[in-house]
């Protein structure tokens, strides 16, 4: 444990509230990062495009606009975001599905798949199972108001 970690630990132990602990931890992480938490311009641009209101952007289109090689872009993106651009976009597309699912309502899975950017229902089901561990019908049967959580079956 380095000197900064020891200092942060001591401050956390002396903190009187969760809010104070959070501020101390945030400041410690910022200092550990060298005070520079800015995004690489290519990553900032890509995230903006991937979240853009104009619909889904293809990774190749965004990469072409950035001016980095595809390999370098993937490397920089993964270092900053923690996921490759492809996996990030898959997770984002999956997250768009969840608000469409409401218990007790008739679900048109093919329509939801198309609205959320899937090529077909099989592609949708594959991603759904990969990210949730269950198929869409099982999710619907077990879903709660907390979209990213379903009860574990024992």
Image (spheres, rainbow, N blue to C red):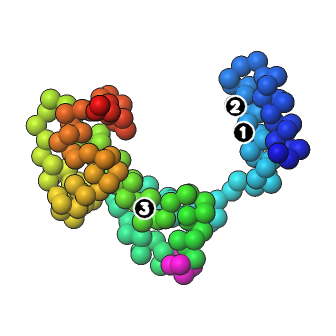
- Residue at 15%, 29% (x, y): give it: 104
Is residue 78 or residue 43 the one in the foreground?
Answer: 78
Determine whether the residue tagged by mark 1 lies in a helix, strand or loop.
helix
Mark 3 neighbour class, 10 Å CA radius: few under 14, some 14 to 19, many 20 or more: few
Mark 2 lies on residue: 22
The residue lying furthest to the front in this view is 154
Residue 65 vs 23, above or below: the answer is below
The residue segment tinted magenta is 65-71
Mark 1 lies on residue: 26
Mark 3 touching mark 1, by CB under 8 A? no
Mark 2 touching mark 1, by CB under 8 A? yes
- Residue at 24%, 39% (x, y): give it: 139
Left or right: where does residue 66 sit relative to residue 19? left
Residue 139 vs 67, above or below: the answer is above
- Residue at 82%, 45% (x, y): give it: 1
Is residue 50 or residue 134 the one in the foreground?
Answer: 134
Residue at mark 2 to residue at mark 3: CA–CA distance: 30 Å
Left or right: where does residue 37 sit relative to residue 104? right
The quarter of the picture where the C terminus appears is: top left
Residue at mark 2 to residue at mark 1: CA–CA distance: 6 Å
Determine whether the residue tagged by mark 2 lies in a helix, strand or loop.
helix
Query: Magenta segment: does it hold 69?
Result: yes
| Disc assigned to residue 87 | 3
Is residue 18 or residue 40 the one in the foreground?
Answer: 18
Query: Magenta segment: does it hold 58?
Result: no
Mark 2 neighbour class, 10 Å CA radius: few under 14, some 14 to 19, many 20 or more: few
- Residue at 85%, 47% (x, y): give it: 2
Residue at mark 3 to residue at mark 1: CA–CA distance: 27 Å
Residue 63 vs 150, above or below: the answer is below
Residue 100 in view here: yes
């Amino acid at each position: 444990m380095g000197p900064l970690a020891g200092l942060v630990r001591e401050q956390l132990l002396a903190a009187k509230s969760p809010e104070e602990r959070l501020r101390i931890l945030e400041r410690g992480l910022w200092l550990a990062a060298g005070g520079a938490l800015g995004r690489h311009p290519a990553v900032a641009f890509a995230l903006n495009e991937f979240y853009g209101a104009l619909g889904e952007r293809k990774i190749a289109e965004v990469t072409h606009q950035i001016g980095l090689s595809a390999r370098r872009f993937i490397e920089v993106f993964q270092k900053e975001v923690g996921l490759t651009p492809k996996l990030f976009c898959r997770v984002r597309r999956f997250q768009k599905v969840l608000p469409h699912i409401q218990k007790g309502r008739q679900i048109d899975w093919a329509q939801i798949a198309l609205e959320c950017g899937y090529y077909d229902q099989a592609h949708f089901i594959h991603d759904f199972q990969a990210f949730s561990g269950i198929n869409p019908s099982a999710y619907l049967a077990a879903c709660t108001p907390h979209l990213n959580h379903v009860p574990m079956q024992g």
